[in-house]
Image: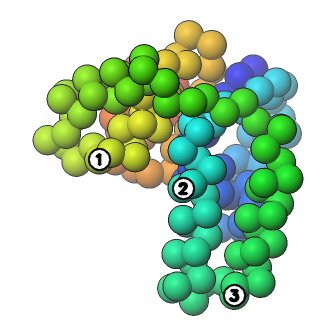
Amino acid sequence: MNIFLDTSTLFKLYHEEEGTDEIDRFIKEHNVEHIFLSAITKIEFESVVWKKVRTKEIPKETAQQLIALFRADYDKFSFVEDHVEVKAIAISLLEKYGVRGLRTLDAIQFATAKYLEDIVSLHNTSDKRLEHLFQLEHLTTNLSD
């Protein structure tokens, strides 16, 4: 099985929070061959980590460890670059869902998920707005499906 994770779900694999057990269990119970990530996840992941430092949810040392762990795991993931086709999909999704609050980086994540829809069985996000938009585009999002 191939799956797509956006940054909000991927982060749960590195930091214990609500939803961590669910994604861990899903990966262990299913034959996950490839985890696809948008290339912007490398940037977003570090942004999430440093936000957690700013909001005093984690100390700086933990942040550095989380970033080092993720970087060391890069070869475990299949990163999808935001090439011309992904950007074109993102623009069309913004035209369609911009009025529903779709923003730039989420549009790139969403476009990556759409780009992969024929080779990925699960498209997971922990962002409720984005999950709703995934479902409107008939992308499978439920970890229990």
Of the two numbered discs 3 and 2 on the same chain, state the one appearing first in sequence: 2
Q: Is residue 137 above or below residue 8?
A: above
Residue drawn 57% across the image and 36% down it: 38
In percent of width and height, residue 129 lies at 34, 47
Residue depicted at x 52% and y 85%: 54
Question: Which image quarter is the N terminus in?
Answer: top right
Residue at numbered disc 2: 44
Within 10 angstroms of label 1, few (less than 14), some, or many (20 or more) residues? some
Left/right of residue 19 with respect to residue 27 in the rendered view:
left
| 124 vs 58, nearest the viewer | 58
Residue 103: give its label. 1
Count of residue discs: 3
The residue positioned 51% from the left and 51% from the top of the image is: 126
Residue 59: which numbered mark, if any? 3
**Distance Cα–Cα, label 2 vs label 1:** 14 Å
Q: Residue furthest top?
A: 118
Mark 2: few, some, or many residues within 10 Å (few <14, many ≥20)? some
Callout 2 secondary element: helix
Residue 123 lies in quadrant? top right
Q: Which mark is residue 10?
A: none
